[in-house]
Structures are given as C-alpha cells and as structure tokens.
Image (cartoon, rainbow, N blue to C red):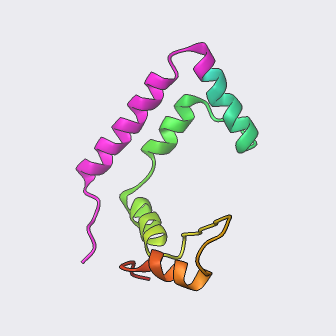
Amino acid sequence: MRERLTPEELERTKTQIEGRLRLQLESTSALAEFLGHQAALVGSVMSPAEVISAVRSVSAAEVQNTAEELFAGRGWRLAAVGPGPDSESALASISNGVEG
C-alpha cells in the first residue's frame, strides 16, 4: 500500500519552502544570485512572489504523481566515470530492493 501525502504534510512543506526562500533572499546579493541563476539556468526569471505562488499551487496529486515516477525507477539515471564493475552487476546492486 502506498503512503499518501496528507493535507497537513503538504501545507507544512509549502510553508517551510516559503519561509526558507524568504529568509534566503533577505540580502540584495542573495536576491541578485536568485534571479541570476534563473536567468542562466532556466532562461526566464520569476520573482520570489511568483515562485511562492507556484509552490502554493502544487497539489497533493502532483506531488504523488512525481514521487511515483521518481521512485518507481523510471526516472533514475546513473553516470559513473573510472574503473569499476561491469554495468550489469552495478545496476543489479543499485536496484536491489527497488520496485519497478
């Protein structure tokens, strides 16, 4: 049986994300870094208020669907560089106990 995200857990998480963002952006340099990262990595810029609004709009169903995609093994990727075991035995070691 899958665990479901309760409304209380979702609200607590949204509040934590919002609070952490507000605290992190108290300085001018932190705000500039926040906006610069978005411009460089995403190609567009959202204000802190827009980010908070986007976080607030996330539903429990969206969180559940994303978690199912990630933890079902379909969304995982692994890259390794250097000498090591063959890929089949490495994948078998990593996926032990993971349901797909």
Can you say whether 24 is above or below 5 in the image?
above
Image coords of residue 79 (percent x, y)? 64, 66
For image coordinates 44% across by 83% down, the residue present is 100
Q: Quadrant of residue 34 in the image?
A: top right
Q: Is residue 33 left or right of residue 5?
A: right
Residue 8's x, y, as percent?
Answer: 23, 48
Q: Nearer the viewer, residue 16 or 58?
A: 16
Q: Main secondary structure of the magenta part?
A: helix
Please give the name of the residue rendered at 29% of the width and 59% of the height, measured from the top-left corner: 5
Q: Vertical placement of 73 versus 25: above or below? A: below
Left or right, 74 with reference to 1: right
Q: Measured along the vertical axis of the image, is residue 62 above or below residue 98?
A: above
Q: Residue furthest top?
A: 28
Q: Is residue 38 left or right of residue 54?
A: right
Residue 4 vertical position relative to residue 39 in the rendered view, above or below: below
Q: Is residue 39 magenta?
A: no
On-image quarter of the N terminus: bottom left
In this image, 77 relative to 18: left or right? right
Instruction: Looking at the picture, tell me which residue is in the foreground, 73 or 83.
Output: 83
Closer to us: 69 or 80:
80
Residue occupying the point 68% across, 65% down: 82
Q: Is residue 5 magenta?
A: yes
The image shows residue 71 at horizontal and vertical percentages of 43, 70
The residues colored magenta run 1-30
Q: Nearer the viewer, residue 18 or 50?
A: 18
Q: How many marks?
A: 0
Residue located at (41% from left, 38% from top): 17
Residue 87 on image: x %, y %: 61, 80
